[in-house]
Image: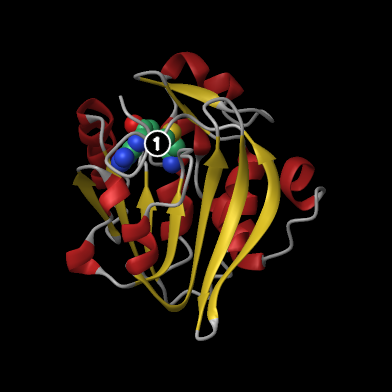
């Protein structure tokens, strides 16, 4: 998977390549999907949600320009795969999920896998997690029509945020950087994510 889908398509960050080689993706999907876990496509994870295609995970992770010392906030824990990849790179991962079933299931999985530098929370991630901020990087793994203002507030100076922004059915992957001279945004290209639902996202 890492050679054919990630390195072959231009992902070069050694920390991202190493983390994706380490994390066993098949443990984050249901037993029925184990044989497809390393395929070049997204997969259903229950509750109408999906785990992204491996290349998208790699691209979003690389776009955060991580060096290992960071505290990162992820919105949309889902299966936990993205948080697991981040946790192999950075100091600490804070991840928020609004679906209670997925929240409980994935929290147990992190315990079983001894991913002790991941902290989970059951709430509306569009409001961020102010008490633990500011964060060096923020990743939103569900699509909204705008970047939630509380997340930009909770990003440290010099921090990076990546999120799919657009309509209900397709979005653009937007990378934002908070600099002393203002907010810089870059469009990384088209993508398709499930909906970000919450106060600063879509209505249910
Ligand atoms: N990062 C996940 C992707 C899961 S899909 C993975 O690696 O598997 C997106 C997830 O975002 C879903 O689980 C959905 O329930 C969750 N979500 C949607 N809106 C949310 C919100 N406002 N706060 C927290 N989680 C949210």
Q: Is mark 1 within 8 Å of ligand 1?
A: yes
Residue sitting farthest toward the bottom: 180
- Pick the quarter of the image with the C terminus: top left
Labels in figure, total: 1
Model colouring: secondary structure
Q: Which residue is nearer to you in this view: 18 or 143?
A: 143
Q: Residue at 62% x, 32% y: name it.
A: 38
Asked if residue 46 is positioned above or below residue 9 in the image, the reply reads above
Q: Could you tell whether 48 is left or right of 41 in the image?
A: left
Residue sitting farthest toward the top: 32
- Image quarter of residue 94: bottom left
- Pick the quarter of the image with the N terminus: top right
Q: Could you tell whether 70 is left or right of 154 in the image?
A: right
Q: Residue at 36% x, 58% y: name it.
A: 149
- Is residue 18 in view from this perspective? no
* Quarter of the image where ligand 1 sits: top left
Where in the figure is residue 35, as x and y percent of width and height?
58, 20
Where in the figure is residue 140, as x and y percent of width and height?
44, 48
Q: Residue at 54% x, 70% y: name it.
A: 177
Q: Which residue is nearer to you in this view: 26 or 186?
A: 186
Asked if residue 30 is positioned above or below residue 59 in the image, the reply reads above
Where in the figure is residue 33, as x and y percent of width and height?
51, 18
- Is residue 68 in view from this perspective? yes
Q: Which residue is nearer to you in this view: 126 or 133?
A: 126
Say which element carries label 1. loop
Q: Could you tell whether 28 is left or right of 34 in the image?
A: left
- Image quarter of residue 73: bottom left
Q: Circle 1 sits on which residue? A: 196
Where in the figure is residue 74, as x and y percent of width and height?
38, 52
């Amino acid at each position: 998977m890492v050679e054919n889908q990630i390195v072959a398509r231009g992902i070069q960050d050694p920390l991202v390549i190493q983390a994706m080689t380490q994390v066993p993706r098949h443990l984050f999907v249901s037993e029925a999907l184990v044989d497809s876990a390393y395929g070049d496509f997204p997969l259903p994870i229950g509750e109408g949600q999906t785990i992204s295609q491996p290349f998208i995970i790699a691209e979003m992770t690389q776009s955060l320009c991580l060096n290992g010392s960071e505290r990162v906030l992820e919105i949309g824990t889902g299966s936990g795969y993205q948080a697991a990849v981040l946790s192999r790179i950075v100091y600490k991962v804070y991840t928020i999920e609004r679906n209670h079933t997925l929240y409980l299931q994935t929290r147990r999985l992190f315990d079983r896998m001894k991913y002790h530098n991941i902290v989970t929370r059951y709430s509306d991630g569009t409001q961020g997690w102010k008490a633990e901020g500011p964060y060096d990087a923020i990743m939103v793994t569900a699509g909204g029509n705008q970047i939630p203002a509380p997340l930009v507030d909770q990003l440290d100076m010099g921090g990076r945020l990546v999120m799919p922004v657009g309509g209900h059915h397709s979005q653009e992957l937007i990378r934002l950087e908070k600099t002393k001279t203002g907010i810089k945004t870059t469009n990384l290209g088209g993508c398709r994510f499930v909906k970000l639902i919450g106060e600063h996202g879509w209505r249910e």
